[in-house]
């Protein structure tokens, strides 16, 4: 189970122009609220390195344990790049009904938008996106970003999971709402 905390003054973004095609809805959450295990069941190529089966255990917002079926040493080095490299910078969901990408290509630009049988989510370790701030991103100083839990890093690495999953939102009112199931948004 993975816990992601959206954080204060955030908004979800879709089709932002960051990458085309873009079938994802994403947010840069408050990194301090990340708990649990995230598993990237899809491989990744980065800087000429191949990694597979990456499992990250988060505690108090930072990665405490790293496992990988292949390329573990490279993953460890990437997440040690700077303080923010071992923290979450982005969380994304892709609805299988909208994505026309139906096979994995081991190229993050496409793979992070993979629709597939169960849709996908991806988690990026490292830098966050200021445009998920619910206000004018130009107003975000380093101090405001720090207070709001936007992560800062030289790294931004998307790790993709295409397994069957459900995502539940826990509202401040105490109510829980199922928002994603069987690869599709429920609203």
Image: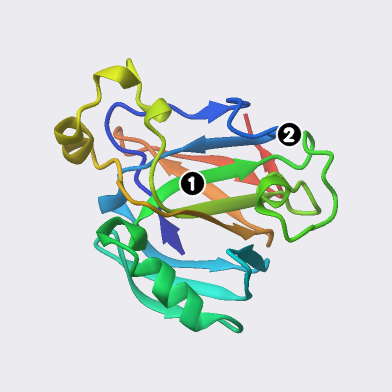
Q: CA distance from mark 1 to mark 2?
A: 17 Å
Residue drawn at point x = 70 percent, y = 44 percent: 113
Residue 91, label in figure: 1
- The disc, 1 or 2, on the residue closer to the chain's N-terminal end is 2
User: Residue 63 appears in which quarter of the rendering?
Assistant: bottom left
Percent x, y of residue 117: 81, 54
Q: Residues within 10 Å of mark 1 (few under 14, many from 20)?
A: many
Q: Residue furthest top?
A: 136
Tell whether 92 sits left or right of 98.
Answer: left
Q: Position of residue 46 (x, y in %)?
A: 59, 63
Q: Examine the rendered structure and indicate whether residue 68 appears above or below residue 2.
A: below
Disc count in the image? 2
**Above/below status of 2 relative to 11:** below
Horizontal side of 111 relative to 101 (left or right) equals left
Picture layout, residue 6 above or below residue 89:
above
| Rendered residue at 41%/76% (across/down) | 76
- Tell which of 61 and 125 is nearer to you: 125
Q: Quadrant of residue 179?
A: top right
Q: Is the residue 71 above or below the residue 140 in the image?
A: below
Say whether residue 44 is left or right of residue 67: right
Q: In this view, which residue lies farthest toward the front?
A: 48
| Mark 2, secondary structure of its residue | loop
Q: Secondary structure at mark 1?
A: strand
**Tag 2 residue:** 21
Residue at 78% in and 38% down: 99
Residue at x 30% of width, y 18% of height: 138
């Amino acid at each position: 189970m993975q816990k992601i905390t959206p954080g204060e003054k955030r908004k979800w973004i879709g089709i932002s122009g960051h990458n085309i095609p873009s079938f994802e809805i994403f947010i840069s959450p408050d990194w301090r609220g990340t708990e649990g295990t995230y598993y990237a069941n899809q491989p990744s190529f980065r800087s000429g390195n191949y990694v597979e089966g990456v499992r990250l255990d988060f505690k108090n917002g930072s990665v405490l344990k790293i496992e990988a079926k292949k390329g573990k040493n490279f993953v460890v080095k990437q997440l040690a790049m700077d303080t923010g490299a071992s923290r979450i910078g982005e969380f994304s969901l892709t609805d299988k009904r909208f994505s026309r990408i139906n096979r994995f290509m081991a190229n993050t630009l496409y793979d992070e938008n993979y629709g597939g049988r169960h849709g996908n989510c991806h988690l990026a370790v490292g830098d966050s996106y200021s445009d998920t701030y619910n206000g004018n991103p130009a107003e975000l100083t380093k101090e405001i970003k720090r207070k709001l839990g936007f992560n800062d890093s030289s790294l931004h690495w998307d790790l993709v999971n295409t397994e069957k999953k459900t995502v539940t939102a826990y509202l401040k009112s105490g109510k829980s709402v199922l928002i994603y199931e069987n690869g599709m948004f429920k609203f």
